[in-house]
Every structure is written in structure tokens, then in C-alpha cells.
Amino acid sequence: MALTDPATGRVHRHAPRSGPADTDAACFAAAAAYGHWSTTTPADRQRALLGIADAIEAHAEAFTAAETGDTGKPAEQFRDDELPGIADTFRYFAGAARNLPGAAAAEYTEGRTSLLRREPVGVCAQITPWNYPLMMAAWKIAPAIAAGNTTVLKPADTTPSSSVLLARIAADHLPPGVFNVVCGDRDTGRALTAHPAVALIAVTGSVRAGQEIAAAAAAGLKRVHLELGGNAPVIVHEDVDVEATAAALAGVAFYNAGQDCTAPTRLLVHRRIHDAFLAAFAARAAGLRAGADFGPLNNTAQLASVRGLLDRLPAHAGIVTGGSRLPRPGFFHEPTVVAGAHQDDEIVQEEIFGPVVTVQSFADEAEALHLANGVRFGLAASVWTTDHDRAMRATRALHTGIVWVNTHGTTVSEMPHGGVKHSGYGSDLSLSGLLDYTQVKHVML
């Protein structure tokens, strides 16, 4: 497969397209390794994961070159913002593996003692997206391996380079077969998820991909873990510092060209400050620099998707700033702000996954929450206010898996990352993410 650098539009390397024989080999290798790896001690797994974390940092430049070549994102952003968190993911799960929770043994019926064992699931098929290739690989691989499973990872067809590099480096710290990578397209992914050796399928991707995989997994009664699309609402109340809030949100909204399922794409602003906030936010968006503050869209299909949403804007919605593809090599698009859209418009209801943000107004708290919850997605949201009680009401009322207050987009290894509704189910990161890769056994003596 030819891999295109989205910053230049030119082919920069090639990757294999794994066929059925390759997928079989990877899955059978994982199945063979499972018998040994599942019986290793948490301390053994910890040492391996800590070694991988150290190796990631030691090969920072190689990972940066691999990731930026496939994604086109600014090298400094990946190296400084993403890579430290990727290493931390492995270090967190290295420790979490040694702290599995469990109920105390007890007698729930006379003469019998019950206890619980928490055991690995088996071979895990893991599919990752093209927006954060190495980060999403870490979020999948680290908890699965920490829990005693073996894995077969299929990265997105446009961004396999950093995952392949990770597998090569991890081979110095893991037994053969514990962590495997197959490259390829949707056919490769279908073969992987349908493989009889696979016990659990974990996917970060589109809603359509999640629906297809869940349906296919049902035939084999495979466990499924889905982190799908997002369309994050941001509620901005009238008591905020307008300039500071606009600056903070612009920095997050257009990071990675808006290709983030938690990106703040729907700004819901109190009508008292709507015009002032819109002007401040649009000015911030217009001042962002391509290639420095944001990178390109990943591929021509995604660029066409973003362009289609803007081309189909209804007459009552208008572009305040941006709106065009940048006249330079690669797949760069201007940061774009849209005002006047209605709640049932396509631009509001669908995940954009690009550098486009809509700004709507609301009259009161109830309307803000109604608008925020009025889409099929439920991954993330944020609320901006100085009123503590109002913020806490919003955290209860928002139908999302993540709610930020006076911030947006920050993740930490210790806290879960997952959604509800069409954003999927299951958690990445945190102890919850580790437990998703285990199964419980009741033992009675």
C-alpha cells in the first residue's frame, strides 16, 4: 500500500497489505503465546511494559518521523504533546496490573467460601484510527497486555508506520506472539475480527465501523469494546471571561485539524455574550498557522467529507471565517467557524472530524442542556462558568461519558475515556480500561 504524507500530498513510503494467511499467522501466534503470557505474574508484565515505555522515549525521534510522515501533523506537537502521554500510558498500566480490585472471600451460604478470580480474556483483536495512531495503539495494547492477554493490532491503512515501529521495539521486551501487527484495509480488518482465535474486539473508529464489527462479532459471541464518533457540545455561560474562553477553546478545537472525537465542535453560547464571543473565537481561529498550530486532514476522502458539509450548508447558516481549502500542497483546510445553524442541520447533527466549529446561542440553562444532548453522540462535553452549582448541574445532566468544567480535551491515564449512545461503550485508560480486558470467575470452596 502506498502511504501519502498529508502535508505534501506525496507518497513517502509503502506498507504491506496483510492477506488472510498473514492474519491467520498473527492470530495463531497470539493464541500460542497466550498460554504462557496469561500465567505470568503481574510483576513480570510490569517489567515488560516499563521497558516499552522507556524504549518509546529513547526512540522519540524515530516515532516522531513515523507518525508525522503518515499524519502530516506538526512534529513539535506530536513529540511534546502526545509522546509523553503515550509513554505514561504504558507506565500507568504497568502499575495497574499489580492492583486489580476484588471482593474479599466470604461465606454467603453455610459451609462454603466464595472468592473471585479476575482472568484475562484471550486473544484480542484491536483496530485503531488514523487521527492519533500511536496514542490509540498504546491505549489498546497496554491494558490488554497488562491484564495477561495477547493482541493482534490493525492500524488504519493510511497510518501504520508508528504501530509497526512500536511492535519492533516491543519485541525486545515481550515474548514472541504477545503483540502482533497486521497492516491492511477493511478486508484485513474483517478477517481479523472474524477469526475464530479472537475472543475480544476493541475498536476506535467511526460509528459505521462499530456497527459492522458489533454485528459480525455477534455470530461468534465475541466481546466488543467500541470507542466511536463524537460531536462534543461546549456550553459557554454569560459569566465567563469572553476573550480567555475563546482563546482556550480555539486552541483545542483546531488541534490536529479538528480530527479528534472529543474536539469541541458545537459551541453553545449564552445570547448575552454570543456576538462578542463569536467575534473573539473567529479572530482566534483566523490567526492560527497551518503547519505550526494545526496540520492537514489525513486523506482526500476526509477532506472531501469536510468540504461536502460546508458546501451543503443551508442558507440560514453562514461562514464567519475560513471555509476553504488552503492553496498549498497537502490536505490543509482553513479553520472554519459557522454561525446561524439550526439544531436539526446536518452540520450540527453529524460528526465533522475536521477544522470546522459551529456556534449557536441559547437563552437559559435548560435550553443549553437540551441543545447539548440533542445529537446521537455522547462521548464528551464541557461547560464554562464561574457558578459552581450550575457547573455541577451540567455534569449530571449532560449525556456523555466525559464532562470537563472550564477546560476541554485533557486526558489522564488514571481516568476513563469512553462514551454513551452512538459513541460506543467500554472505556480506554484507567482501571476501568484494564478491567474491560478481564473476565470474572467465581470459585466456591
Image (cartoon, rainbow, N blue to C red):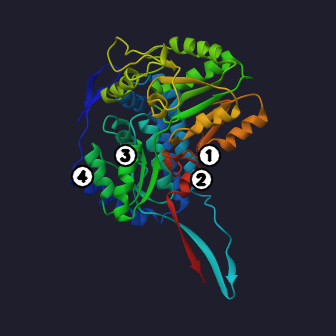
Relative vertical location of residue 88 with respect to residue 3 in this rendering, above or below: below
The location of residue 262, given as percent across then percent down, is 53, 35
**Marks 3 and 4, how far apart at CA:** 22 Å
Q: Are marks 1 and 2 in contact (CB under 8 Å)?
A: yes
- Mark 3 vs mark 4: which is more N-terminal? 4
Q: Mark 3: which amino acid?
A: Ala
Which residue is disc 1 drawn over? 414
**Marks 3 and 2, how far apart at CA:** 26 Å
**Marks 1 and 2, how far apart at CA:** 7 Å
At x 37%, y 16%, the residue is 325
Nearer the observer, disc 3 or disc 2?
A: 3
Q: Considering depth in this image, is 130 or 327 the residue closer to the camera?
A: 327
**Marks 4 and 1, how far apart at CA:** 35 Å
In terms of secondary structure, where does tag 2 sit? helix
- Mark 1 vs mark 3: which is more N-terminal? 3
**Marks 1 and 3, how far apart at CA:** 27 Å
Mark 2 burial class by Cα count in 10 Å: few <14, some 14-19, many 20+ = many
**Marks 4 and 2, how far apart at CA:** 33 Å
At x 55%, y 60%, the residue is 42
Picture disc at residue 22: 4
The reply, left or right, for residue 324 in relation to residue 20 is right
Nearer the observer, disc 3 or disc 4?
A: 3
Q: How many marks?
A: 4
